[in-house]
Amino acid sequence: MTPRSLTALEIAAGRSRFLVPAYLQYHPDCPVAVARANGAYVYDLEGREYVDAFAGVVTISVGHCDAEVLEAEIAQMRLAQHVTTLYHHEAPVLAAEALAATMTDMGDVQLLFTGTGTEATEFAVHLAKLHTGSSVVLSLRNSFHGRTLMSASLTAQEPWRNAGPYAVDTHHVAGPYAYREMPRGMDEAMYEAHLLAELERTIKHTGGGKLAALIVEPIQGNGGVLYGSNEFYGRLVEIVHRYGGLVIADEVQTGFGRTGKWWGSSHWPLPPDMRDMAKGMGNGNPVGGVAARVDVAAAFKGKAHFSTYGANPVAMRGVTKVVEIVGRAETQRNIQTRGEQLLTCLGELQQRHPLIGEVRGKGLMIGVELVRDRTTRAVAGTETLAVMDHCRTHGGVLLGKGGAGNVLRIKPPYCISADDINTIIRALDNALTTVESAG
Ligand SMILES: Cc1ncc(COP(=O)(O)O)c(C=O)c1O
């Protein structure tokens, strides 16, 4: 029997009836009902084409339905769809070998594969506790690390914290957000020194001077594309290690070339002891993992841990192919040049549009913070939604948002072309003009 096909209206009605109301949706007045996707484009049921500037919440790295990735996955699907790590299979070994070769900053690593980024956070913290004998885990405010108990406890964003109490011994410390949170009278160096002093005080007085780990996104994604300086990250690593803790880099968004380097942490002196990954790793396939230094992973000797769907051979074939494609010079060049094009064009838009408070980011991970007033920096939340809706309806562009709902997130697939970037900029220009003139 062929499955029933639904119209866009039937999908909307069925979603309200059968899916939980917790699912957020973009463009509630004009939802996008997706029919298919290819490369940097998404097509709706009416056949409209959109430049996907949010890449399925940053999951699509090399491009929607990339032919090479699909071929690798389908070939494996025909052989064996799932076997678990109870049996030997070459696919996770090949994927881990390919990944390990990209992580020379960590020395020798071992990997555990998961189904999601949330699960990767859980695993990394579990291992950090075993390795250090401490249960104190810190994260930075505005971070996002997942939605299960431990990962939600570490996630430090108001919308995601609605079902406490959270895990004991998890604490948040302020992270760098100079544009919005730097106290008056401080410069950036003073501000970051102040943050680091507070980090050290938290370890000493709240954690009793013993630390399992600090988990950090090299660039906070959901938080609104936020990051600190070389000095900040260098000193952060030094402090965490001084108190016996491990640095976990949550590279679920910043990994796999997204920021113009293989790993986001390589922009700074931030060599992690463990690295969480997911999203772009699978190019749309649900897969994640943690890479741990071999001496850290050794804490698992004699203990059992695994994930039923982690190391799934189909996912692993996809990961290996994604690593190969991201490693190609032309992919890396495109991330770099398209990222530079975006930053230059957005800088020009900022000159003409008072709604744009700040443009920031690296590679194809860009945030555009919208404010009602450049002096007060009042959050332009409804304006951000209006800009996104306008880009969707009039510009053929899908954007994401983050921060306090006022940071446009532009994180397209790596195969995006110069023309596609121009389409994004044109759509934004028109949307900002319309929203500014309405306000
Ligand atoms: C930085 C970061 N870590 C962890 C997660 C959780 O990943 P997942 O949604 O695959 O569980 C996300 C998801 O948005 C993320 O952005």
Image (cartoon, rainbow, N blue to C red):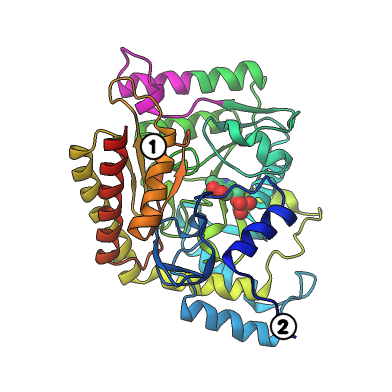
User: Residue 246, position in %: x, y?
Assistant: 59, 39
On the image, which quarter does residue 72 sit in? bottom right
Q: Amino acid at mark 2?
A: Ala
Q: Residue furthest top?
A: 185
Residue 190 in sight: yes
User: Residue 127, position in %: x, y?
Assistant: 70, 46
Q: CA distance from mark 2 to mark 1?
A: 49 Å
* Residue at screen point 67% across, 87% down: 78
Could you tell me which quadrant the N terminus lies in? bottom right
Residue named by callout 1: 383
The answer to whether the residue bearing label 1 lies less than 8 angstroms from the nearest atom of ligand 1 is no
Residue named by callout 2: 80
How crowded pointer 2 is (Cα within 10 Å; few <14, some 14-19, many 20+) is rated as few
* Residue at screen point 78% across, 75% down: 87
Could you tell me which quadrant the C terminus lies in? top left
Instruction: Please name which of the two marks, 2 or 1, marks the residue nearer to the observer.
Output: 1
